[in-house]
Amino acid sequence: MSIDLKTIKHISKLSRISVDERKAEKLASDLNSIFDFIEKLNELKTDKVKPLTSIAETTLKLRSDEVKSKNIREQIIKNSPQDNEDYFVVPKVIE
Amino acid sequence: MSDITKQSLTELVENIKIKKLSSTDITKAFIERSEKSKELNAYITDDFTSALDKAKKFDQKPNLDLKLPGIPIAVKDLFCTKNIKTTAGSKILNNFVPTYESTVTENIWNEGAILLGKLNCDEFAMGSSNETSFFGNVQNPINKDLVPGGSSGGSASAVAGQLTPITIGTDTGGSIRQPASFTGTVGLKPTYGSCSRYGIVAFASSLDQAGPMAQNVKDCALLQEVISSYDTKDSTSIDFKRNKYSKELTNNIKGKKIGIPKEYRVDGMSKEIEDLWQKGIQYVKDCGAETIDISLPHTSYALPTYYIVAPAEASSNLARYDGVKYGFRAKGENLIDMYEKTRSEGFGAEVQRRIMIGTYVLSSGYYDAYYLKAQKVRKLIKNDFDEVYKKVDAILTPSTPSSAFKIGEKTNDPVSMYLNDIFTVPVNLAGLPGISIPAGHDSKGYPLGLQIIGKAFDEQNILNIAYAMEEKINFKNKITDWWIK
């Protein structure tokens, strides 16, 4: 199989990572060699195999819904690239 | 001073307990050596000033009942440390200061240890050579031209170079065991669910595990005892009876059945690795264990499976880095443009590559062909192990297909880099514990490791086998301190 530039552009959009032409070409070549290697899995017949869904076969435990960390708004906001009062600021979304 | 840093963790703890050394003596010694070792580039962030303060405070009122009394420890920069910058080796987290502490590091501080600093690693733990870090590559103390392995390369380099008595790394596909093997140190990847993932920057959540990296097996057992805990903050943490690994450590492995999997004799494996493996087989026999030839038929499918599962999980985990709530933000004309530029400028090439692979294999029309297929093969790989563990107690293999390679040697060929993890990846896919111990040198004098793989939750058994083998091997790391002027 072969991943072309159009596919790279599509994945880049889905991943929200901008790529220019040069980067797209390099990615296409890298991804093709990686997928050539991955194709090995097609040697195996797996129609009757159940996929692994969890490595540890345990059931999730329930817990009571309690607030444990309170009043950490300020601490959290401190890490934001841009904020105003208690809000994260992003580029304008609605004109 | 210099001989303090040569001591093992166990010796340092003993010397603190009999009051021959103070926490301040030890902390000072490791800080001094770390400061002289900048060329290794093992640290991303140091916390030396506050480490010394904490050591002095410890000495004023020492609690000698703790397991790591006043011991300074540097940790991989993938563990969130409260109020100390945590970067995961990435530009995108270059200014991130966590407001909480990871459970694993919390466990260490609760036993009296003191944070020395945060150690370099491949960006988001994606790499096998520590060359993908935004903060530059790490040097291997064994030789200036060599990579220390990865992704826990800074951790391996710091333990081998004696900048910290012991450390913790994380292992998603071999990131503890491969650098341990490349630097002549001991590294344990515990069973999935043994150590809490809370507060560890996520890479591939069904594979990630934290684990100890040490100069010897006993130290490794002691740290494993401290970091392993059941934690309600990680929904995949498992509540099982944990051993007192260091107290219960024994070199008596008489009658243990150890499997030798023929599929690990891969094409193109050097004679040196084969010879090392044969030597390992002889050592376990000398210890009174029995070896049995076994087959793990799906071994060669493990790496292709891993390169679907791990990037798929990573693409989902790394979706959170959008330049809004924390981390680096690039300027954009609008919101989408800001996201795309932030992620394009904030992530390095390898991370972008893996996000792209993951996004592709999960995208509409490809999910069944790739992700579902991989999860089915993963089941087959796990079944292989379940089957052989009916007959054997543990499995012995080489840790890596070669010794440490040169800096820059594999950076242009992702697949050749991925092949480094050929012996370690199956263990993560099956959620099992595995330990790498130094077992010899190649013709160039570089260390080589052997891996012991155990049953789930059977860390004590593989630690015991490693302990018994360590005694027979009597490995001496050849480190000349070339970086200290």
Image (tube, rainbow, N blue to C red):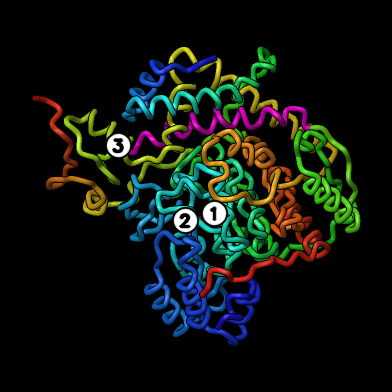
Q: Residue B197 in the image: x percent, y percent? A: 50, 47
B85 sits to left or right of B355: left
Q: CA distance from mark 2 to mark 3?
A: 23 Å
Mark identifier at residue B113: none
Q: Amino acid at mark 1?
A: Gly
Quadrant of the rendered image containing residue B428: top right
Q: Amino acid at mark 2?
A: Asn
Mark identifier at residue B120: 2
Q: CA distance from mark 3 to mark 1?
A: 27 Å
Does mark 3 fall on the same chain as mark 2? yes
Q: Is residue B342 above or below residue B95?
A: above
Chain of the residue on which disc 3 is drawn: B
Tell me the quadrant of the picture where the N terminus of chain B can be found: bottom right
Q: Residue B433 in the image: x percent, y percent? A: 67, 46
Q: Is residue A86 above or below residue B311?
A: below
Name the front one of labels 2 and 3.
2
| Magenta segment | B296-322
Helix, strand, or loop for circle 2?
loop
Q: Amino acid at mark 3?
A: Asp
Chain of the residue on which disc 2 is drawn: B
Can residue B395 be spotted in the picture?
Answer: no
Q: Residue at x 40, y 58 (%)?
A: B81
**Marks 2 & 1, CB-CB < 8 Å contact:** yes
**Marks 2 & 3, CB-CB < 8 Å contact:** no
Q: Which residue is mark 3?
A: B322
Q: Earlier in the sequence, mark 3 or mark 1?
A: 1
* Residue B77 forms part of the magenta stretch: no
Q: Earlier in the sequence, mark 2 or mark 1?
A: 2
* Residue B302 forms part of the magenta stretch: yes
Q: Which residue is mark 1?
A: B153
B130 vs A44, nearest the viewer: B130
Q: Residue at x 15, y 28 (%)?
A: A93
